Image: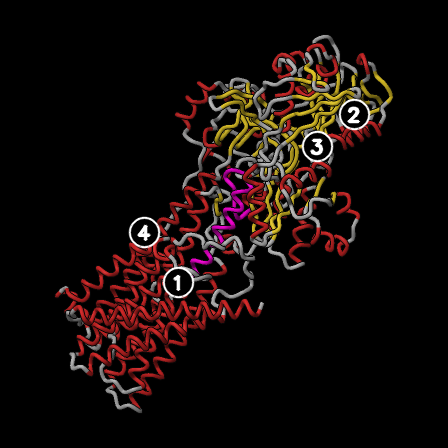
Amino acid sequence: MEKWHSLDIETVFEKLDTSAEGLSDKEAHKRLKKFGPNRLPEPKKRSAFIRFLLQFNDILIYVLIAAAIVTALLGHWVDTGVILGVVILNALIGFIQEGKAEDALEAIKKMLSPTAMVLRNGKQLTIPAEELVPGDVVLLQSGDRVPADLRLFRVKGLQIQEAALTGESLPVEKSIEPVAEESVVADRKSMAYSGTIVTHGQGAGVVVATGAETEIGRISTMVGEVEKLSTPLLAQMSQFGRWLTVAILFVAAAAFAFGYLLRGYEAAEMFLASVGLAVAAIPEGLPAIMTITLAIGVQKMAKRNAIIRRLPAVETLGAVTVICSDKTGTLTKNEMTVRNMAVDGRFFEISGSGYDPHGEVKEADKGVDPLQEPLLQEIAKYSVLCNDAELQEGEDGWRVHGDPMEGALLVAAMKMGVDIELVRKENPRIDLIPFESEHKFMASLHHTHTKEAFIVVKGAPEVLVSICDYQRGADAKEEPIEGAFWHSRVEEMAKRGERVLGVAVKFVEFGKSALTFDDVEGGFVMVGLCGMIDPPRPEAIEAVKACKKAGIRVKMITGDHGATALAIAKRLELENCEEVISGEQIEALSRDELAKRVERVDVYARVSPEHKLVLVELLQESGEVVAMTGDGVNDAPALKRADVGIAMGQSGTEAAKEAAEIVLADDNFASIKHAMEEGRTVYDNLKKAIIFILPTNGGEALIILGAILFGFHQLPLTPVQILWVNMVTAVTLALSLAFEPPEPDVMSRPPRDAKAPIISLYLLWRILFVSVILMAGTFGLFILEQKSGASIEHARTVAVNTLVMFEIFYLFNSRFLHGSSFSLRALTGNRYVLGAVGVLVLLQLSFTYLPLLQKMFGTTSIDAAVWLKIVVIASSVFFLVELEKYIVERFERKGS
């Protein structure tokens, strides 16, 4: 292995046959074929066989396997075969679904793969990290994940968090000097390693290793793998399963003792009845249905640009009460456009939108020639020089590589007639201080070919006014600065919803070659102000309205000026658009005072990422369930602290994406609203599946218990018939509920209580109520058939078909947790329901009339008159449950 860290940078460039200008596209393509994609080897996966075996790791399945063993010992081979068949079918469903989930995770990992900023053909480009090759020059800035192993050759305050490799908790300050050959990884300050995260500053390095050849590729699997976690809901249902198992075994044992000791049943006969009771009460299909419902929800969200990285977010989404959202790019378009330039007391308006560099310059509604305005030419020139962005025209229009605000300045300069490449060549950059939120400005040092040197500073106007002693006046003369004048200009522009940047310059000695913070403490000349607008997305305005209706409060957090923030908030129609809290106020207010104001105020301006964490904590302390958006490395604490962290997929740093539960593929606030809607729908559908499946098991268990209590020596349902009912209804009817569309009022009702159990007292009542209806109707028809002289096979066939028909009718009740099912929508609103009913009817006809299934399940043919009785009796559940819904709804309305 080459010891890149110990070589000087000239030697590194020579060995890699490259330069500080990077590779050409042709050379990069050739090297990509030679070295392969910059991708780590896939982690070792469990074999398909092991994954299949793990599907049996469930306490309810253990009970069924035990029942199969006992029936085999008793010689009831048909019962044994059907029980084992159901167990294997359940395992197959889980196995197939897990395979789909793994495929989904792979797709998500690809969507989350990092990009890299590189120099190709001497120009700055953003490319997928997988396309990096040795010899590429990579540019790094705060928040980036290092995409490959780099030998650094330019750094400016560069610090990198390397805990993933070294275990050190503090970021490492980087330099470009070679280090000793025997240095350990933690001491190789001239290197940046793949998978580590830039926490501060900027830098540039040449790629020395990619893929499996990187340091992290040799010692670890990919950092930041998408996690697959068990959700609180699944943990809750697992605990419910354990309690249910204990209860089932206790009731089965009690039934065995009662029947054997008090009713005089034979031990073997009573044991089979107890097995039937246990099988009846176990909801075999519930785990698979729950997993599939969650997976379908995740897939639906992905289609609406919300990528779920951690499953708990699916549940939590339905309980969110407050969304703390960034403004730029999320609530707005993130296509900054310079609308105004203020120089020497004059206002110039600039037309055009987005990044298309065509527009007209006006003063007082009159067109002007920007080439004849020296101050406009000066501010445009300096805006180009103190700027890291690149503007590129492609097939789909103009694009900006870099910061959108800097891109807007380039566009404005082109509208002024400035040749960007020429200006940069005539005034090459020697050094810079990159923009950081702590100091709120960017500074660059330039030399000209005429032996002049100057420093350009671009940033927050209040900061620039404080470091300027002069201002550019008429005829480009320098005058003493008037701070009040510039502050009034800033307020005037901000009230129109514009983001304001100041531009200042200071000429220095030509021999100056390095830039420090001491150089920007004073002596500057204020050149002018640029007012930019980033208009709200139309869909964001509608999404905010929808959130209001759903009881979700939207709070806007921005680094912009307070007046700008309020102007955008008014256009978005936030609840409180008249009051704003600034970062300075957050610092000055006590925690108690701030807590009181946070409940009321919806706009926060000039807020640093550190303040976001405080706001999230205070909202949570007041009982809110908080979703938080973020894109920067410093947003990570707030994203982690929030109940649902939401990172920006396009503009977000890798640090933000790793801290978040959700990544927005389009950085659009409307996608958050869609995710909330899907989250509520997923939770509703889980509840629908549960209250549909459990009454079936409850009704079957009551039928067996009733038979034992009343001394029936022939049970209405055999264990194998019960298993048939449970499985065919689970894989048809219950599964169709996973595809339920949102209920009409899903975004009209308040968020659910996050602490409330999924099975409430009302749902317990519904389960018991429906169980009794199913038991009474099925048992009643069984008794009537026996009294009419029918055989036990005939009576059992009627009982099974009655139970299944009950479930078909009850399915339509279950489609709406809230509101009546007496509607055309209840019948036709979900095509999967009608398909499931059709499939189940075919299965039941086969169960009833096919000789093979008759022999296996002990059934016999029945005539049309009996079917009519079954349908009439079974339909009663639909009308009784709808009546119950109506009574409960009226009672709730009176109570409120």
Q: CA distance from mark 1 to mark 2?
A: 71 Å
In this rendering, the label closer to the viewer, 3 or 4: 3
In the rendered image, the vertical position of residue 813 relative to residue 435, given as above or below: below
Specify which label sits upstream in the sequence, 2 or 4.
Answer: 4
Task: Please provide percent x and percent y for residue 244.
Answer: 41, 72
Rendering quarter of residue 720: bottom left
Residue sitting at x 72%, y 33%: 494
Q: CA distance from mark 3 to mark 4?
A: 61 Å
User: Does the CB distance between marks 1 and 2 fall below 8 Å?
Assistant: no
Q: Amino acid at mark 3?
A: Arg
Q: CA distance from mark 3 to mark 1?
A: 52 Å
Q: Which mark is residue 496?
A: 3
**Residue that badge 2 annotates:** 519
User: What segment carries the magenta color?
Assistant: 660-689
Rendering quarter of residue 478: top right
Residue sitting at x 80%, y 18%: 472
Q: Which mark is residue 48?
A: 4
In the rendered image, the vertical position of residue 139 relative to residue 890, given as above or below: above
Specify which label sits upstream in the sequence, 1 or 2.
Answer: 2
Q: Amino acid at mark 1?
A: Ser
On the picture, is 203 further left or further right than 582? left
Specify which label sits upstream in the sequence, 3 or 1.
Answer: 3
Residue 557 in sight from this viewpoint: yes
Specify which label sits upstream in the sequence, 3 or 4.
Answer: 4
Q: CA distance from mark 1 to mark 4?
A: 36 Å
Residue 686 belongs to the span the image colors magenta: yes
**Residue that badge 1 annotates:** 814
